[in-house]
Amino acid sequence: MARPKIALIGSGMIGGTLAHLAALKEMGDVVLFDIADGIPQGKALDIAESGPVEGFDAALSGTTDYADIAGADVCIVTAGVPRKPGMSRDDLLGINLKVMKSVGEGIAAHAPNAFVICITNPLDAMVWALREFSGLPHNKVVGMAGVLDSARFRHFLSVEFDVSMRDVTAFVLGGHGDTMVPLTRYSTVGGIPLPDLVDMGWTSQEKLDAIVQRTRDGGAEIVGLLKTGSAYYAPAASAIEMAQAYLNDQKRLLPCAAYVDGAFGLDGFYVGVPTVIGANGIEKVVDIKLSKDEQAMFDKSVDAVKGLVAACKEIDPSL
Ligand code: TXD
């Protein structure tokens, strides 16, 4: 049986890290695509040459021709520009929307049966635009944000509680922006919900609120430190977890920017929600009951995403 084929559309900081992780985990053969000739080919060759040392078997190649992604099982899209200090994710919309058009057409032409994971920012609008441009089924196009935002939240909590990061679970809803909604009552340490840990004196509400805010600012904190780009190790690891859930039919319950039609009172909209990912892509959107406060924060987040989608339609009336 042939190995799965993973196409990485965009071979920059996240794309290269995705290729490296996919090879190390022997997830399948990897094709790196970019418009910058030489970058995808060089990174593919360099990672391939680490194969004998790491002990993985995978065919890696780089290309600037969409024909080479033909038949990909998974496409992970990072094509576009990242933000610089002082830029918001939303500032990237104009440039990256045009990129999504060319990427969507390339995937539609050469890998229409792929599970597509969009990473490009502003994520919630770009994943919607990518789905529109590609015409792929809604359950096969998803955005990566919630897994990353939850991972950041879980990391900060594990430091606060001095427990293994593996024993912290977290739930983040809504858009991948300042309006994201970390749900503390569904986040736990070893199954103990965070509010109980506050009552047990493991932390204080003030410290918890500060951790929630640091999670919201997680991207900007790294952009401010790196100065020349944005985060790429944790974003890549997060997208790989989603790709593995699809390729191995793992039925993982993961927070993703998915197409929501009916759940959460939404009628056809991409936003961060709990999903089940398996061999059919997004197999389920988990419609949880939100408290009044949570619903208000979620609605605010949905409105922010609606604003970005409206801006996309302004720029490209074909949407
Ligand atoms: O959680 C999340 N979703 C975010 C997403 C987490 C971190 C970064 N986020 C966004 O991912 C970031 O704001 C950017 O929009 C993307 C990619 O970030 P990365 O750090 O990988 O950017 P790079 O290193 O600049 O790589 C982008 C590559 C680069 O090699 C360009 O040549 C290429 O994209 N590029 C294109 N490829 C194909 N087609 C077109 N049109 C194109 N334009 C640029």
Image (cartoon, grey):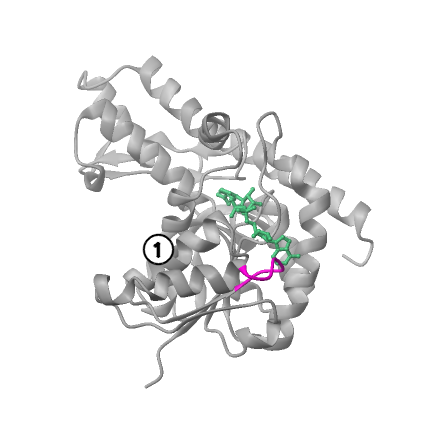
Residue at the image point whose x is 35% and y is 66% from the top: 48
Can residue 120 be seen by looking at this rendering?
A: yes
Q: Quadrant of the N terminus?
A: bottom left
Occupied quadrant, residue 44: bottom left
Above or below, 282 against 161 in this view is below
Residue 288 x %, y %: 42, 45
Residue 133 x %, y %: 69, 63
Above or below, 116 against 273 in this view is below
Question: Image check: 286 left or right of 54?
Answer: right
Of residue 294 and residue 90, the one placed in the foreground of this image is 90
Of residue 197 and residue 33, the one placed in the foreground of this image is 33
Question: Image check: 90 left or right of 177?
Answer: right
* Stretch of the chain drawn in magenta: 33-38
Q: Amino acid at mark 1?
A: Glu
Above or below, 161 against 251 in this view is above
Residue at the image point whose x is 32% and y is 38% from the top: 170
Residue 171 x %, y %: 37, 39
Point out the residue furthest to the bottom here: 1
Q: Quadrant of the C terminus?
A: bottom right
Of residue 317 and residue 65, the one placed in the foreground of this image is 65
Question: Image check: 246 left or right of 8?
Answer: left
> Total label count?
1
Question: Image check: 137 left or right of 279?
Answer: right
Element at label 1: helix
> 10 Å neighbourhood of mark 1: few (<14), some, or many (≥20)?
some
Q: What residue would you read off at disc 1?
A: 241
Occupied quadrant, residue 46: bottom left
Magenta-drawn stretch, dominant element (helix, strand or loop): loop
Q: Is residue 102 magenta?
A: no
